[in-house]
Amino acid sequence: MAATAPSMVRAQAILDLADAAQGESPIARALRLAAATGADAAGLRDAPLGRLNAATLGFHAALAGPRLEAVAACPSCASLIEFTLDGDALRGLDREAAGGELTMVTDSGEWRVRWHAPTAGDVMDVAARTDAASALLALCCEVNGPSGQGAADAPIELVERIETALADADPLAEITVGLECPDCRAVFDADVDPIAFVWHEVQARARRLLREVDVLARAYGWTEADVLALSEQRRTAYLEIVREGA
């Protein structure tokens, strides 16, 4: 996970976020985390997904710094591969994704497409569907075939062109990293989900804080509020004293 760094997110806020977001969908959870750093959650819901990913990485920077340390399993030999990403560099990929139009001529005639980059709200709306990918395509694209066909009838080559256009418009919507396994030398792409990554970090921080509260409450008789009011540096100092006296 992320390297240790002074947190600009208060301890109480971390626990409150972990509790409030526990049962939420990934998009709702990310909106809550972004709002914790002052971002406009309503605006992010209506913005392209990459904007929410950038805001989530911004929360991670405030929580633990910009460095992201991740692990991927090699699909060939199952070895675990550690790799590092620069969150600030990823956030630099954020852009004003909008929409556009494209045409394709097939044997059956001309297909016309008007599309917009999927928003966080779009993804949330189709997340629970078994046909989420095709539902998202229909939601973001107005497809007109030569005989009045819609998105459901679009040929595979047209779908691929649409997907390329969407990826080019919003490069932070889906993040993939090219890796080579040091054990078997297999080369593969690993998906990086900023929302899942940052939520895992929040959960880990919350668990650590609860353990710290438990140790200091037992040692000094302090309440949870007393412990959480301490700075991270002060909590660490007291924990060291307790361990030295154990």
Image (cartoon, helix red, strand yellow):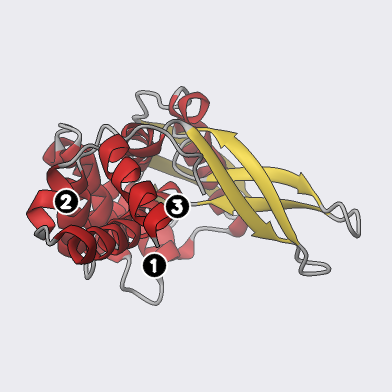
Query: Seen in the image, is 73 located left or right of residue 86?
Result: right
**SS at badge 3:** helix
- Callout 3 amino acid: Phe
**How far apart, in angstroms, are the residues tagged by discs 1 and 2?**
44 Å
- Which residue is the site of mark 1? 132
Image quadrant assignment for residue 245: bottom left
Snapshot quadrant of residue 112? top left
Q: Which of these two is toward me, 213 or 238?
A: 238
Does dot 1 land on a helix, a strand or a loop?
helix
The residue labelled by disc 2 is 227
Where is residue 43? Give x, y as percent: 16, 36
Amino acid type shown at disc 2: Val
Q: Residue at x 76, y 53 (%)?
A: 188
Among numbered discs 3 and 2, the one appearing first in the sequence? 3
Could you say which is closer to the camera, residue 142 or residue 94?
A: 94
Residue at image coords 23%, 58%: 216
For marks 3 and 1 on the same chain, the one whose residue lies earlier in the sequence: 1
Relative to 16, 58 lies left or right = right
23 over 59 or under it: above or below: below
| Label number found at residue 197 | 3
For marks 1 and 2, the one nearer the N-term is 1
Q: Which mark is nearer the camera, 3 or 1?
A: 3
Looking at the picture, which amino acid does disc 1 mark? Ala
Residue 29, numbered label: none
Q: What is the crowding at mark 3: few (fewer than 14 residues within 10 Å), some, or many (at least 20)?
A: some
Residue extending furthest toward the front: 245
Q: Can residue 154 be seen from the camera position used here? A: yes
Determine the residue positioned at 41% across, 72% down: 131
